[in-house]
């Protein structure tokens, strides 16, 4: 690729929850930043550049919050870069930060992403009743449910697959102290009794609304080699996007996602992702996106993603664990959710995932998507240099 | 907004237009630093945070903009200060604290190192000047809002 090597040397996140009234947006961001810097053994003074991401400003109604955060991050005189890619932004932001290092321009880069969902109402902010359009008034769940229905029809997946994913993720989240929801007692039976919100999406199959932030510290190879901390080497990154609507669009398995994954594996030298990747943190805000992304990312053959779920492939004990952290289904500070996926992937290969550690994880994938399944951001991190 | 009938305008060139009124409720969670500042205003005290280099921020800074250090050292400053910059507001809006024309001013309160924006009640533009001394006029109602200070008024000569 011609790019310089880059390593994640610090990961931090808040203890995500419904409302963090005790902190401002700046205070929330600093909690994640301070934890990431502490794990890297660094301070703000060591940082050369800062990359900030969050979902659309309309979600909290604070325009260009990166300007406000400048003082709180002691960023005066340093390059500050803001990334906007809807729900995938946490992933895109981490990639932009990595590129700051891989380009050879900066040696020590801090990146942070956040959402204070309690300051607004994301579901309705995403459902503006634009004149002359169809007034859907349904939020993200209403947008995605027909796509999920389409997946079920074309793949022949039985109705309980979504609930299986939800029970797995909520159970995994109990091993993650930072997860928003800690609900240990779910069973498939109980899950199938939860109310139907947007047919076929049940209550348990939906992400919560969270306040939270995540931060990463990334450094160049020469800096990383001097540091005595766990490291996650960035083996490859990829981003792709496509329009929300166009004739013939495959909404179930968007081409942008397939191309993004192909590019990601090629750059990482991966020819068989199912065999070579040890653990994945994949953006699954509605449970059915796990089988859909298993196919879109090339892990499962077309229409077989749900069989992987049914066979336990994505359990923590399975061949390819998906979201041992509990995933977006257990924690969703929207703008931060992608960076949490990227950070959790890094924690796995750094050996820092605690109770939800997958033993011996050497290569991990972080994934985020956003908008109407149209923005994709992915990375592969490894315990060894690429 | 759901259920409102679409008000379509048929333009003479054949195009169509319709209004989009975006109305949307937000919350604001201040965190403890800004909350303490505003709560102290309700008690008719003006407080700021002090950085390690001695600078006092009013309104308070949560973090030192130079070092990023969290600022938890509180100091009370005076309710009088000096106008460092100003602009005349000839036609007040309904939600301004003053009904008559007034000045917006950056006021460096006694004991503070950064100026704070507030309204100054002056009888005319001619009464406003950089360097003039002003004093806070407290609102009748003791509320944790910046409008707990109704305005500032010129003092002395």
Image: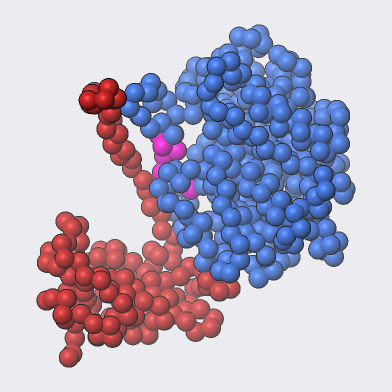
Chain colours: A blue, B red
Camera-nearest residue between A264 and A358: A264
User: Does residue B58 appear left or right of residue A339 in this picture?
Assistant: left
In which quarter of the view is residue A357 placed?
A: top right
> Which residue is depicted at the point 55% across and 56% down?
A29
In which quarter of the view is residue B19 placed?
A: top left
The image shows residue B119 at horizontal and vertical percentages of 23, 70
Camera-nearest residue between A237 and B78: A237
Judge whether A386 appears above or below A299 on screen.
Answer: below
Please give the count of numbered marks on the rendered protein.
0
The image shows residue A202 at horizontal and vertical percentages of 52, 22
The secondary structure making up most of the magenta span is helix
> Which residue is depicted at the point 57% across and 66% down?
A75
> Which residue is depicted at the point 24% across and 67% down?
B148
The image shows residue A321 at horizontal and vertical percentages of 76, 32
Image: magenta residue range: A116-125
User: Does residue B70 appear left or right of residue A323 in this picture?
Assistant: left
Can residue A172 be spotted in the picture?
no
User: Does residue B73 appear left or right of residue B9 in this picture?
Assistant: right
Camera-nearest residue between A36 and A202: A36
Q: Is residue B139 magenta?
A: no
The image shows residue A383 at horizontal and vertical percentages of 85, 47
Q: Is residue A120 magenta?
A: yes
């Amino acid at each position: 690729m011609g790019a310089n090597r880059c390593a994640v040397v610090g990961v931090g996140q808040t203890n995500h929850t419904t409302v963090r009234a005790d902190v401002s947006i700046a205070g929330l961001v600093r909690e994640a930043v301070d934890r990431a810097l502490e794990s890297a053994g660094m301070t703000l003074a060591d940082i050369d550049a800062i990359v900030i991401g969050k979902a659309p400003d309309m979600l909290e109604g604070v325009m260009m919050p990166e300007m406000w955060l400048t003082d709180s991050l002691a960023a005066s005189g340093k390059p500050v870069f803001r990334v906007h890619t809807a729900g995938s932004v946490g992933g895109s932001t981490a990639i932009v930060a990595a590129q700051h290092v891989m380009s050879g321009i900066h040696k020590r880069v801090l990146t942070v992403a956040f959402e204070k969902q309690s300051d607004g109402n994301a579901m309705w902010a995403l459902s503006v009743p634009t004149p002359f359009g169809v007034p859907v008034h349904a939020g993200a769940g209403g947008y995605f449910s027909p796509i999920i229905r389409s997946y079920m029809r074309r793949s022949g997946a039985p109705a309980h697959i979504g609930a299986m994913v939800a029970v797995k993720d909520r159970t995994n989240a109990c091993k993650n102290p930072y997860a928003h929801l800690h609900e240990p007692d779910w069973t498939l039976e109980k899950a199938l009794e939860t109310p139907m919100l947007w047919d076929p999406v049940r209550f348990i199959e939906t992400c919560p609304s969270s306040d939270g932030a995540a931060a990463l510290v990334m450094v160049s190879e020469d800096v990383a080699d001097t540091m005595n901390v766990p490291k996650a080497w960035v083996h490859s990154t990829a981003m792709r996007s496509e329009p929300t609507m166009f004739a013939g669009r495959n909404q179930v398995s968007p081409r942008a996602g397939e191309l993004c994954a192909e590019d990601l594996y090629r750059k990482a030298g991966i020819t068989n992702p199912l065999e070579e990747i040890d653990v994945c943190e994949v953006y699954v805000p509605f449970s059915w996106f796990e089988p859909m992304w298993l196919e879109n990312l090339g892990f499962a053959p077309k229409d077989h993603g749900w069989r992987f779920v049914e066979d336990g492939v994505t359990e923590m004990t399975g061949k390819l664990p998906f979201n041992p952290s509990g995933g977006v289904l257990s924690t969703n500070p929207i703008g931060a959710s992608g960076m949490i996926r990227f950070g959790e992937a890094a924690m796995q290969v750094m050996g820092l995932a605690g109770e939800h550690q997958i033993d011996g994880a050497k290569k991990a994938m972080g994934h985020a998507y956003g908008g109407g399944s149209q923005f994709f951001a992915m990375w592969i991190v490894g315990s060894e240099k690429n | 907004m759901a259920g409102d009938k679409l008000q379509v305008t048929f333009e003479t060139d054949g195009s169509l237009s319709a209004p989009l009124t975006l109305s949307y409720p937000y919350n604001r969670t201040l965190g403890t630093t800004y909350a303490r500042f505003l709560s102290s205003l309700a008690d008719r005290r003006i407080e700021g945070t002090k950085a390690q280099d001695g600078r006092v921020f009013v309104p308070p800074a949560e973090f030192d903009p130079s070092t990023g250090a969290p600022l938890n050292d509180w100091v009370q400053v005076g309710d009088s200060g000096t106008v460092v910059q100003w602009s005349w507001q000839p036609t007040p809006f309904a939600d301004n604290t003053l009904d008559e024309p007034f000045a917006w001013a950056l006021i460096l309160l006694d004991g503070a190192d950064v100026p704070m924006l507030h309204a100054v009640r002056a009888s005319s533009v001619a009464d406003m000047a950089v360097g003039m001394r002003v004093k806070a006029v407290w609102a009748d109602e003791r509320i944790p809002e910046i409008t707990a200070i109704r305005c500032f008024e010129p003092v002395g000569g």
